[in-house]
Amino acid sequence: MLELLRRFSGGFRRYFIIGPACKLLEVFFDLLTPLVIARMIDEGVGTHDAGLVLRYGALLIGMAVVGMCFTLVCQKMAALASQGMGTQIRSALFRRINEFSYAELDRFGTPSLITRITNDINQVQLAVALGVRQLIRWPFLAVGSMCAALLIDLKLGLVFLISTPLIGLVFWLVMARCVPYFKQMQAKLDRIGLITREGLSGMRVVRAFVREDHERERFRAAAYEQSAVAIAVGKLSSVLNPVTFLVMNLGVCAILWMGGIQVDTGVLTQGQVMAFVNYMTQTLLSIVYVANLVVVFTKASASASRVNDVLDCEPSITDDGNEPVTLPSASDVERGTAPAALRMDGACFAFGDAEVNTLDRVSLTLQLGQTLGVIGGTGSGKSTLVSLIPRLYDVRSGSVEVMGTDVRRWPLDQLRHVVGIVPQRASLLSGTIRSNLTWRDAKATDDELWAALAIAQAEDFVRKLPQGLDAPVEAGGKNFSGGQRQRLTIARALVGNPLLLILDDSASALDFKTDAALRRAIHQRSVEGAAGGALPLTTVIVSQRVSSVRDADLICVMSHGSVAGLGTHDELLASCPLYEEICLSQLKREELEGAGAATPGQAADKEAAE
């Protein structure tokens, strides 16, 4: 908690000064109140002077009004400080999350990050607000009441010296057992967030398999686990108030008993005894409130620790010190001096601290304008392989080069502008079609957007929408079909003219005719770009369909994270049994013959015609 205050309280220091200062002034009037009441009893009530009683009453009302004004100022300072800090912490947390590579996102998990940026920061905000409003008030009121009581009578002050340590002992015993539970509560909330997110995002699947009862049971179990921890904390915390009030009331009884004797002997007046009782009540109530504050601060401390874990986590992928990369020119391509568009040399990768590599010694070279097809069974490492190209993950050993430069030496912004990637899962954000398409290039013109939609085979259905490019997109693109979402994400990747386009099984929801038309349009885009003096578009296609990759210039067959075969379609049919097996599972033998003789564009034309 102190670390968060050190980081984010700089712009709010005046609130942390003005707020407690106003609260101290309020406490000053609270400490004067028992003395005024004592004078009222001794001088007004004791002498039956109604006028004096009214004057003291008016003084009490005036002190209360002034104290309330200071309280309102303090409340505003607390709100400004807590909400301002909360906004800054939340913004910093969101910014840090967006800096994370996939490795850090895998480590924390999406549900946990959502809980930290919402519930945990809310706990911190509450602690900051109460800190400004109450942290000074109650300790100062307790100490001030004790000092004022001791000044009235030292013997009665012994009651304070006995009561306060008793309450402190109870408080320490309870809090020592409560603290571990608070961290457990936040972890249980992470679990509830995970189940809720899975259940809502997968609602169609849940209903399709009639698993509503199962999901309800999962949620119920997670909710009961969290409630069990909360109840355990509540039971422990519930001990505080009864015990402290018991000690307080016993102390009041002792004061009245001892004070009554001293009043009879003339040592104390009735007003002084009442003032002593008021100070006793204020002191012990202050301790009760301090105990409750510590509960809040303990929760906030656990939450702040979780927030700091994210803020202190340094992204494993950074581009610090990387200079902009000079791209090859069209003349370099003509002279044959242009570097390879993509080169992998012994690339190895593993998730986290796993001992076994997910990708093992992958080596391949793809020239500018060529097409690489990646095929293999489920879990063979295809998507992991292509995620190394835009540096979503870093290799454990070996290297990955784009345009002749290791991706670890590229500025990330430049690399991810050169490389356009369409992920397996079509992801659209709420907004409009235009706002989704302009992610890569915010200044893209309508003509450029329509050109990208035409290549992605999405122009027809977008033009049929009443609002065209400004048609609304719901969260996740739920108002579009799976094929429409995929085509929109492909168009998004084409905006901004990437030099290397990665299609990670992004045509799985498209029919064969549309898939073929898409590949033909991409090939034509590459040819036209090269003819117009621009660099040709290099394409990487990940697919389960043989028809999508068989006409590629180079095909990489993946098996359990390793390259099982590398070559053209005809070469692999002759040398790679796994590729032949995949082909024969989808096509007849006669359909395979001569498939590699045509260029990607010609083959796509033929497939689209069929």
Image (spheres, rainbow, N blue to C red):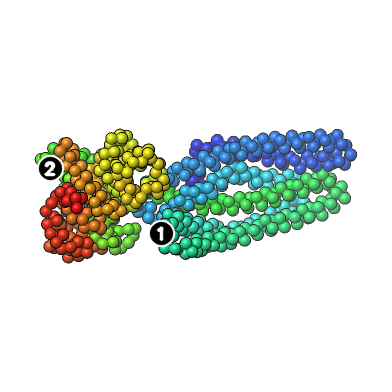
Q: Which residue is mark 1?
A: 205
**Within-10-Å neighbours for mark 1: few <14, some 14–19, many 20+:** few
Q: Give the CA separation, mark 1 to mark 2.
A: 52 Å
Q: Nearer the viewer, residue 581 or 539?
A: 581
Task: Classify residue 201 by image quadrant.
Answer: bottom left
**Within-10-Å neighbours for mark 2: few <14, some 14–19, many 20+:** few
The tally of labels here is 2
Residue 240 percent across, percent down from the top left: 65, 57
Above or below, comparing residue 472 to residue 426 in the picture: above
Q: Amino acid at mark 1?
A: Val
Frontmost of labels 1 and 2 is 1
Say whether residue 317 is left or right of residue 182.
left
Residue 245 percent across, percent down from the top left: 71, 55
Above or below, comparing residue 95 to residue 544 in the picture: above
Say whether residue 229 is left or right of residue 573.
right
Q: Please tell me whether mark 1 sits on a helix, a strand or a loop.
A: helix
Q: Which mark is residue 337?
A: 2
Say whether residue 62 is left or right of residue 206.
right
